Amino acid sequence: MSRLISATGLRWFWVAVIVLVLDLVSKQWVLSCLPLGQSKPFMPWFNFFYVRNYGAAFSFLAECAGWQRWLCTVSACAVVVVLLLMMYRTCAKKKINNISYSFIIGGALGNLSDRLCDGFVIDFIDFYIGNWHYPTFNLADSFICVGSVMIVLEHFMSPLNKGEKKKGE
């Protein structure tokens, strides 16, 4: 029997749309304000620094012949489909789970958009201490990481995962 969308986790899909819009707007700002390879200091430990990532996370596979673009594209599509199905199967009342899934979906769609349109992902957030720099990333990456951590924390904090039973069992 078909469930009403409002009763499923898809009710929270608007969060993914907001994440996607924030990511795309931030990348458009980078393209209009920062030349490739240029840094714009913001704080003593944080720069805006426009780089192109042709690989996966931390530029993994960036030096390959181009097939990694399609591997990352297919992987992102698969993740989005699986998480949409999980949202559909999850009750709308499970806010943390659904917001987590939405963060990951929005971030994956943001990076997917870059890969499909440009062939690379636009990264621009540069944290550093002295001469050590964390790998440059973007808002989509941030939302994917936060969503992933939220899923893990929710799993460990959920009463059902601690061996406790639901009321009435």
Image (cartoon, helix red, strand yellow):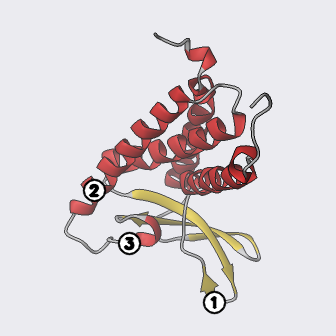
**Three-letter amino acid code of the residue under disc 1:** Asn
Q: Position of residue 162 (x, y in %)?
A: 73, 53
Q: Nearer the viewer, residue 16 or 89?
A: 89
Tally of marks:
3
Identify the residue at image location x=75%, y=40%.
165
Q: Nearer the viewer, residue 67 or 133?
A: 67
Q: Which mark is residue 60?
A: 3
Identify the residue at image location x=46%, y=57%.
122
- Is label 2 in contact with label 1 (beta carbons under 8 Å)? no
Residue matched to label 1: 131
Snapshot quadrant of residue 124: bottom right
Q: Nearer the viewer, residue 38 or 67?
A: 67
Mark with earlier residue (1, 3): 3
Snapshot quadrant of residue 116: top left
Q: Under tag 2, what secondary structure?
A: helix
The 10 Å Cα crowd at callout 3, few under 14, some 14 to 19, many 20 or more, is: few
- Is label 1 in contact with label 3 (beta carbons under 8 Å)? no
Q: Position of residue 85 (x, y in %)?
A: 45, 32
**Three-letter amino acid code of the residue under disc 2:** Leu
Q: Which mark is residue 102?
A: none
